[in-house]
Image (spheres, coloured by chain):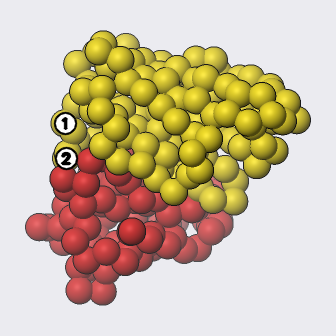
Amino acid sequence: GENVEQHPSTLSVQEGDSAVIKCTYSDSASNYFPWYKQELGKRPQLIIDIRSNVGEKKDQRIAVTLNKTAKHFSLHITETQPEDSAVYFCAARRDGGNNRLAFGKGNQVVVIP
Amino acid sequence: KAGVTQTPRYLIKTRGQQVTLSCSPISGHRSVSWYQQTPGQGLQFLFEYFSETQRNKGNFPGRFSGRQFSNSRSEMNVSTLELGDSALYLCASSEDPNTGELFFGEGSRLTVL
């Protein structure tokens, strides 16, 4: 089955700096890559996703890049703010895979004011 | 639209007991997935239901089971509870059974003593 690895496990950044989280996946047939943000005690919420037919997607301060050849994708957060502090999960899925997402183990991002 | 609703939110059980967790998906969503979240393992896929049929199952023992009703509501059951079953159990629903975004509930926090 699909195996998703996420690095680093913890990331501390100064407010205003950028944060980058990288994930690798094993199944070359995976074609959907969402990122979820989970604040303490809250539900995971989708913040951005990308499909394998594009290499980059941006939404305000958040962007995701995908390298299909290397089988890795990254989340980029620019101009970080304290409310960006959370655990971020990457995931991968093959469309038609019955909504079965394979998640990375999460990355704790701490934005220092 | 109301979000995904899970009940109960918190529960404490002892080893050997069984537990039933409930999930009401977003209205109109027919795909329901269950995930187990633990600090060490992140989110792990349990199973997914669509139109009352289990379409996919993760690598969990047979003590973990589920079902879906005709109104798309779903339940999962864990029998003969073990200490290691302590976790946050998350339910997610999706409008599209194959390519859709997953919307998570707040989860049911199970503690096994």
Residue B107: which quarter of the image?
top right
Chain of the residue on which disc 1 is drawn: B
Q: Which residue is mark 1?
A: B96
At 42% from the left edge and 49% from the top edge, which residue is drawn?
B57
**Residue type for callout 1:** Asp
Read off the residue under disc 2: B99
Q: Is residue A106 above or below residue B7?
A: below
Residue A15 location (% of width, % of height): 58, 58
Q: Residues within 10 Å of mark 2 (few under 14, many from 20)?
A: some
Determine whether, in the image, residue B112 is placed left or right of residue A69: right
Which quarter of the figure is the N terminus of chain A placed in? bottom left
- Residue B94 falls in which quadrant of the image? top left
Q: What x and y, as percent, mark residue B35? A: 51, 43
Above or below, comparing residue B55 to residue A19 in the picture: above
Residue at the (23%, 86%) spot, across then down:
A69
Q: Is residue B77 visible?
A: yes
Secondary structure type for disc 2:
loop
Q: Tell me the kind of residue under disc 2.
A: Thr
Which chain is yellow in the rendering? B
Q: Which mark is residue B45?
A: none
Cβ–Cβ under 8 Å for marks 1 and 2: yes
Element marked by disc 1: loop
Disc 1 from disc 2: Cα separation: 6 Å
**Colour-to-chain, red:** A
